[in-house]
Protein backbone atom coordinates (compact mmCIF):
# COMPACT_ATOMS: atom_id res chain seq x y z
CA UNK A 1 0.00 0.00 0.00
CA UNK A 2 1.38 3.39 -0.98
CA UNK A 3 1.63 6.10 1.65
CA UNK A 4 1.75 9.84 1.05
CA UNK A 5 4.68 10.94 3.17
CA UNK A 6 4.00 14.59 2.33
CA UNK A 7 0.73 14.70 4.26
CA UNK A 8 1.02 17.10 7.19
CA UNK A 9 0.42 15.60 10.65
CA UNK A 10 -1.61 18.73 11.42
CA UNK A 11 -4.29 17.90 8.82
CA UNK A 12 -6.45 16.08 11.37
CA UNK A 13 -5.57 18.39 14.25
CA UNK A 14 -8.66 20.23 15.56
CA UNK A 15 -8.11 23.94 14.78
CA UNK A 16 -9.46 24.90 18.20
CA UNK A 17 -6.77 22.81 19.90
CA UNK A 18 -4.07 24.42 17.75
CA UNK A 19 -5.46 27.85 18.64
CA UNK A 20 -5.33 27.07 22.37
CA UNK A 21 -1.73 25.87 22.08
CA UNK A 22 -0.78 29.01 20.15
CA UNK A 23 -2.38 31.22 22.81
CA UNK A 24 -0.55 29.37 25.61
CA UNK A 25 2.83 29.71 23.91
CA UNK A 26 2.09 33.26 22.72
CA UNK A 27 1.20 34.51 26.19
CA UNK A 28 4.32 32.97 27.66
CA UNK A 29 6.46 34.38 24.83
CA UNK A 30 5.12 37.86 25.62
CA UNK A 31 5.96 37.42 29.31
CA UNK A 32 9.47 36.18 28.54
CA UNK A 33 10.23 38.92 26.01
CA UNK A 34 8.77 41.55 28.32
CA UNK A 35 10.90 40.37 31.23
CA UNK A 36 14.00 40.79 29.03
CA UNK A 37 13.02 44.29 27.96
CA UNK A 38 12.41 43.22 24.35
CA UNK A 39 8.68 43.90 24.34
CA UNK A 40 6.30 46.36 25.93
CA UNK A 41 8.71 48.79 27.51
CA UNK A 42 9.69 49.02 31.20
CA UNK A 43 6.21 48.09 32.44
CA UNK A 44 6.38 44.70 30.71
CA UNK A 45 8.74 43.39 33.39
CA UNK A 46 5.75 42.98 35.68
CA UNK A 47 3.40 41.32 33.19
CA UNK A 48 3.84 37.82 34.61
CA UNK A 49 3.32 38.94 38.21
CA UNK A 50 0.22 40.90 37.21
CA UNK A 51 -1.17 37.87 35.37
CA UNK A 52 -0.52 35.67 38.42
CA UNK A 53 -2.43 38.07 40.64
CA UNK A 54 -5.37 38.44 38.25
CA UNK A 55 -5.75 35.02 36.60
CA UNK A 56 -4.14 32.29 38.73
CA UNK A 57 -6.44 30.09 40.78
CA UNK A 58 -6.04 31.10 44.42
CA UNK A 59 -7.07 28.82 47.27
CA UNK A 60 -7.20 31.78 49.61
CA UNK A 61 -9.65 33.63 47.35
CA UNK A 62 -11.70 30.47 46.83
CA UNK A 63 -11.98 29.87 50.59
CA UNK A 64 -12.92 33.53 51.04
CA UNK A 65 -15.72 33.13 48.48
CA UNK A 66 -17.02 30.02 50.26
CA UNK A 67 -16.92 31.66 53.70
CA UNK A 68 -18.59 34.92 52.59
CA UNK A 69 -21.00 33.48 50.04
CA UNK A 70 -19.76 36.03 47.51
CA UNK A 71 -18.69 34.80 44.07
CA UNK A 72 -17.49 37.74 41.93
CA UNK A 73 -17.19 36.98 38.23
CA UNK A 74 -13.54 38.08 38.11
CA UNK A 75 -12.67 35.42 40.68
CA UNK A 76 -14.84 32.68 39.18
CA UNK A 77 -12.95 33.33 35.94
CA UNK A 78 -9.85 31.97 37.68
CA UNK A 79 -11.26 28.43 37.35
CA UNK A 80 -10.69 28.74 33.59
CA UNK A 81 -7.92 31.35 33.23
CA UNK A 82 -5.11 29.72 35.20
CA UNK A 83 -4.07 27.36 32.32
CA UNK A 84 -2.87 30.38 30.33
CA UNK A 85 -0.31 31.47 32.95
CA UNK A 86 2.90 29.45 33.36
CA UNK A 87 6.04 29.63 35.43
CA UNK A 88 8.45 29.63 32.48
CA UNK A 89 8.64 29.22 28.72
CA UNK A 90 9.65 25.54 29.01
CA UNK A 91 6.67 24.94 31.32
CA UNK A 92 4.30 26.46 28.74
CA UNK A 93 5.95 24.75 25.77
CA UNK A 94 5.75 21.28 27.32
CA UNK A 95 2.09 21.84 28.20
CA UNK A 96 1.32 23.01 24.65
CA UNK A 97 3.04 19.99 23.09
CA UNK A 98 1.06 17.60 25.29
CA UNK A 99 -2.14 19.51 24.50
CA UNK A 100 -1.54 19.11 20.76
CA UNK A 101 -0.67 15.41 21.00
CA UNK A 102 -3.56 14.42 23.24
CA UNK A 103 -5.99 16.85 21.62
CA UNK A 104 -5.32 15.19 18.28
CA UNK A 105 -5.94 11.68 19.62
CA UNK A 106 -9.08 12.54 21.59
CA UNK A 107 -10.34 14.90 18.89
CA UNK A 108 -10.11 12.20 16.22
CA UNK A 109 -12.22 9.88 18.38
CA UNK A 110 -14.79 12.28 19.82
CA UNK A 111 -14.73 15.40 17.65
CA UNK A 112 -13.81 18.97 18.52
CA UNK A 113 -16.89 20.02 20.58
CA UNK A 114 -16.59 17.03 22.91
CA UNK A 115 -12.84 17.52 23.22
CA UNK A 116 -13.31 21.16 24.18
CA UNK A 117 -15.95 20.12 26.72
CA UNK A 118 -13.45 17.72 28.30
CA UNK A 119 -10.87 20.51 28.48
CA UNK A 120 -13.31 22.94 30.10
CA UNK A 121 -14.70 20.49 32.65
CA UNK A 122 -11.29 19.10 33.61
CA UNK A 123 -9.96 22.65 33.91
CA UNK A 124 -12.72 23.37 36.44
CA UNK A 125 -12.37 19.97 38.11
CA UNK A 126 -8.63 20.34 38.54
CA UNK A 127 -8.99 23.74 40.20
CA UNK A 128 -11.83 22.48 42.40
CA UNK A 129 -9.69 19.54 43.60
CA UNK A 130 -6.81 21.92 44.32
CA UNK A 131 -9.23 24.19 46.19
CA UNK A 132 -9.68 21.56 48.91
CA UNK A 133 -6.04 22.09 49.92
CA UNK A 134 -4.84 24.69 52.36
CA UNK A 135 -1.91 26.24 50.53
CA UNK A 136 -0.93 29.82 49.67
CA UNK A 137 0.66 28.70 46.38
CA UNK A 138 -1.60 29.60 43.43
CA UNK A 139 -2.43 27.09 40.72
CA UNK A 140 -1.13 27.88 37.25
CA UNK A 141 -0.40 25.97 34.06
CA UNK A 142 -2.37 23.95 31.51
CA UNK A 143 -1.57 20.53 32.93
CA UNK A 144 -4.90 19.89 34.75
CA UNK A 145 -6.92 20.17 31.48
CA UNK A 146 -4.18 18.23 29.67
CA UNK A 147 -4.59 15.51 32.27
CA UNK A 148 -8.30 15.70 31.50
CA UNK A 149 -7.47 14.69 27.94
CA UNK A 150 -5.33 11.88 29.36
CA UNK A 151 -8.44 10.81 31.29
CA UNK A 152 -10.48 10.84 28.09
CA UNK A 153 -7.82 8.91 26.20
CA UNK A 154 -7.60 6.40 29.07
CA UNK A 155 -11.33 5.69 28.94
CA UNK A 156 -11.27 5.31 25.16
CA UNK A 157 -8.35 2.88 25.46
CA UNK A 158 -10.16 1.05 28.28
CA UNK A 159 -13.16 0.53 25.97
CA UNK A 160 -10.97 -0.65 23.09
CA UNK A 161 -9.09 -3.13 25.26
CA UNK A 162 -12.41 -4.49 26.49
CA UNK A 163 -13.63 -4.98 22.94
CA UNK A 164 -10.42 -6.84 22.13
CA UNK A 165 -10.73 -9.03 25.21
CA UNK A 166 -7.46 -7.68 26.58
CA UNK A 167 -6.67 -6.67 30.14
CA UNK A 168 -8.35 -3.28 30.60
CA UNK A 169 -6.16 -2.25 33.52
CA UNK A 170 -3.42 -1.57 30.95
CA UNK A 171 -5.32 1.57 29.97
CA UNK A 172 -4.20 3.21 33.21
CA UNK A 173 -0.49 2.69 32.57
CA UNK A 174 0.02 6.21 31.16
CA UNK A 175 -1.49 8.05 34.13
CA UNK A 176 0.38 5.70 36.48
CA UNK A 177 3.72 6.49 34.83
CA UNK A 178 3.11 10.25 34.80
CA UNK A 179 2.03 10.42 38.43
CA UNK A 180 4.97 8.19 39.37
CA UNK A 181 7.39 10.59 37.67
CA UNK A 182 5.80 13.54 39.47
CA UNK A 183 6.11 11.76 42.80
CA UNK A 184 9.75 10.89 42.13
CA UNK A 185 10.65 14.46 41.18
CA UNK A 186 8.80 15.73 44.23
CA UNK A 187 10.76 13.43 46.53
CA UNK A 188 14.11 14.27 44.90
CA UNK A 189 13.77 17.99 44.31
CA UNK A 190 10.74 19.05 46.29
CA UNK A 191 7.59 20.30 44.68
CA UNK A 192 4.14 21.75 45.09
CA UNK A 193 0.83 19.97 45.46
CA UNK A 194 -0.33 20.74 41.92
CA UNK A 195 -0.44 16.98 41.26
CA UNK A 196 -3.77 17.11 43.12
CA UNK A 197 -5.12 19.40 40.40
CA UNK A 198 -3.70 17.09 37.72
CA UNK A 199 -5.44 14.12 39.31
CA UNK A 200 -8.67 16.12 39.57
CA UNK A 201 -8.40 17.01 35.89
CA UNK A 202 -7.77 13.38 34.97
CA UNK A 203 -10.79 12.16 36.94
CA UNK A 204 -13.01 14.86 35.42
CA UNK A 205 -11.93 13.99 31.88
CA UNK A 206 -12.33 10.26 32.47
CA UNK A 207 -15.86 10.56 33.91
CA UNK A 208 -17.05 13.04 31.29
CA UNK A 209 -15.78 10.85 28.46
CA UNK A 210 -17.87 8.00 29.85
CA UNK A 211 -20.92 10.13 29.00
CA UNK A 212 -19.67 11.82 25.82
CA UNK A 213 -18.46 8.73 23.98
CA UNK A 214 -21.07 7.47 21.47
CA UNK A 215 -23.48 5.24 23.36
CA UNK A 216 -21.82 6.16 26.63
CA UNK A 217 -24.89 7.59 28.38
CA UNK A 218 -26.98 4.50 27.59
CA UNK A 219 -24.11 2.24 28.70
CA UNK A 220 -23.80 4.15 31.98
CA UNK A 221 -27.55 3.95 32.70
CA UNK A 222 -27.50 0.20 32.06
CA UNK A 223 -24.66 -0.27 34.53
CA UNK A 224 -26.49 1.78 37.15
CA UNK A 225 -29.61 -0.38 36.67
CA UNK A 226 -27.55 -3.55 37.10
CA UNK A 227 -26.17 -2.33 40.44
CA UNK A 228 -29.62 -1.64 41.93
Image (tube, grey):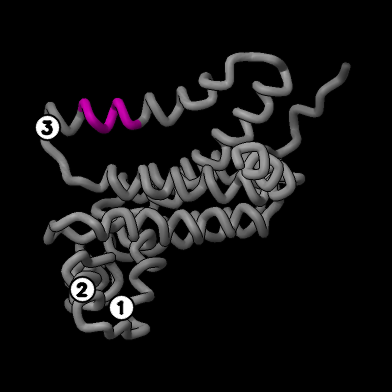
* Magenta-span inclusion, residue 133: no
**Mark 3 crowdedness (10 Å alpha carbons): few <14, some 14-19, many ≥20:** few
First in residue order: circle 1 vs circle 3: 1
Q: Image check: 211 left or right of 84?
A: right
Residue 179 in the image: above or below residue 145:
above
- Find residue 210 and name its label: none
What residue sits 49% from the left and 54% below the top? 21
In this rendering, position of residue 144 left or right of residue 46: right
Task: Specify the farthest residue to the front.
Answer: 228
**Residue highlighted by disc 1:** 75
Task: Work out whether mark 2 precedes mark 1 in sequence or the reverse, and give the earlier one.
Answer: 2
x, y (%) of residue 67? 19, 77
Residue placed most toward the observer, 89 or 138:
138
Dot 3 or dot 2, earlier in sequence: 2
Q: Is residue 154 above or below residue 171?
A: below
Highlighted range, magenta: 179-184
Disc 3 is placed on an element classified as helix
Above or below for 184 versus 37: above
Amino acid sequence: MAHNHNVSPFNSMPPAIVALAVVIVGVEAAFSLGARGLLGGPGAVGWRLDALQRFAFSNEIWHWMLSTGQFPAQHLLRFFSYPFVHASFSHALFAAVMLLALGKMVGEALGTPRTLAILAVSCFGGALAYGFLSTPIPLIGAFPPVYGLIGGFTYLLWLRLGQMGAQQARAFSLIGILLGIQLLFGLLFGGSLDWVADLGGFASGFVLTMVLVPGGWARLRERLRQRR
